[in-house]
Image: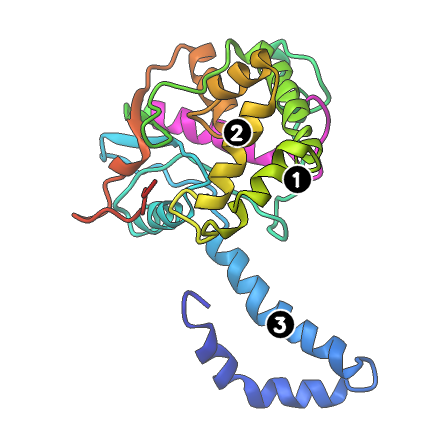
Amino acid sequence: MAGFWWAVVTAGFACCSFSAIRCKAAFHQASFRRFVKLLFNDRATNRTIVFEGKVLPGTGKCVCSWPGKYESAWDALVTGSRSGDISAAVVFLPEGSEHFGSHDAIPKGEKLQGRCWCVPLYGEQKPWGCRWWTKWIANIESARREGAEMEVYFFKGMKGGGKVEDFSTAVEEHLRREAIQGKKRHFLRSQAFSDACDGGIEGLSKEPFGDSSSQYSREVQRLFLAWLPEEERHFMEASEGLGISQKAEVTWLERKGYAYTEVEVDMLPVGDEKVIDFSP
């Protein structure tokens, strides 16, 4: 299943065919095709992208926070960690993985309010849960015991930006960003956006760059920010530099008094070649 799922399918096709015949009465043909797709495709995908971190001893450095929007670089990071080249504390538990949707209580010693970590992180319990946060904290403590230099990766050209004031206020800032971002649907129905469409914005490329954005999405976001009231625009612009989860991670390191090194995402040490296209 580790990159060779097609071989598994080929080798086991006879057994699967026999099982399929026996299940024919229970499965409509279209439903069975969806079942096979889920079995051999989605499970393989989840096994590939699920990552609970891997803190390696003796490496000297540990990637403690990573902006997930850089998908190709994330793949390189996970591959490097699994092969023993990169020590990483970062965690990703997508839908369908074992711990997705799991919640963990906040230790009393932290003196934080909430039934689980979701509350100080998001303001309320979320369907994806907060088990990822518990695992991340455990990885951070492991990296600290190893004496590793903790590295926080910022967006390209935005090193040091996007931080929140304090862990206790992180959720308030998160909710404010969500509320402002929610106005985008109103912007997309506005005269300003209609004028942009008439001006040819739809002709811009939608081919994604290394940060998952495109010429089109970048221009839409630029126009959206310009459409916002000045105070809200400045707030959103100041939030750039770190991903949503990263903001909590960085302020947690600061809450604990753990030193970290600020790094830009294109400096990921994977071989001698850059793995991301940061073209404007």
Residue 24 coordinates in the image, percent (x, y)? 78, 86
Q: Identify the residue under disc 1.
A: 128
| Number of other residues with Cα within 10 Å of mark 3, as a class: few under 14, some 14 to 19, many 20 or more | few
| Number of other residues with Cα within 10 Å of mark 1, as a class: few under 14, some 14 to 19, many 20 or more | some
Q: Which mark is residue 37?
A: 3
Secondary structure under the numbered disc 1 in the rendered image: loop
Quarter placement of the C terminus: top left
Q: Is residue 234 visible?
A: yes
Q: Is residue 91 left or right of residue 59?
A: right
Between the residue at mark 1 and the residue at mark 2, the CA separation in whole angstroms equals 13 Å
Question: In this view of the protein, which residue sits in the foreground, 214 or 101?
Answer: 214
> In this rendering, is residue 81 above or below 260?
below
Q: Identify the residue under disc 2.
A: 245
- Type of residue at label 2? Ser
Please state the extent of the stretch shown in magenta in the rendering: 123-144
- Which residue is situated farthest in the left direction here? 272
- Type of residue at label 3? Lys
User: Sequence order check: which comes first, mark 1 or mark 3?
Assistant: 3
User: Sequence order check: which comes first, mark 2 or mark 3?
Assistant: 3
- Picture quadrant where residue 103 is located: top right
| Number of other residues with Cα within 10 Å of mark 2, as a class: few under 14, some 14 to 19, many 20 or more | some
Residue 89 coordinates in the image, percent (x, y)? 40, 34
> In this rendering, is residue 176 above or below 34?
above
Question: In this view of the protein, which residue sits in the foreground, 143 or 161?
Answer: 161
Q: Which mark is residue 101?
A: none
The reply to whether callout 1 and callout 3 are in contact (CB within 8 Å) is no
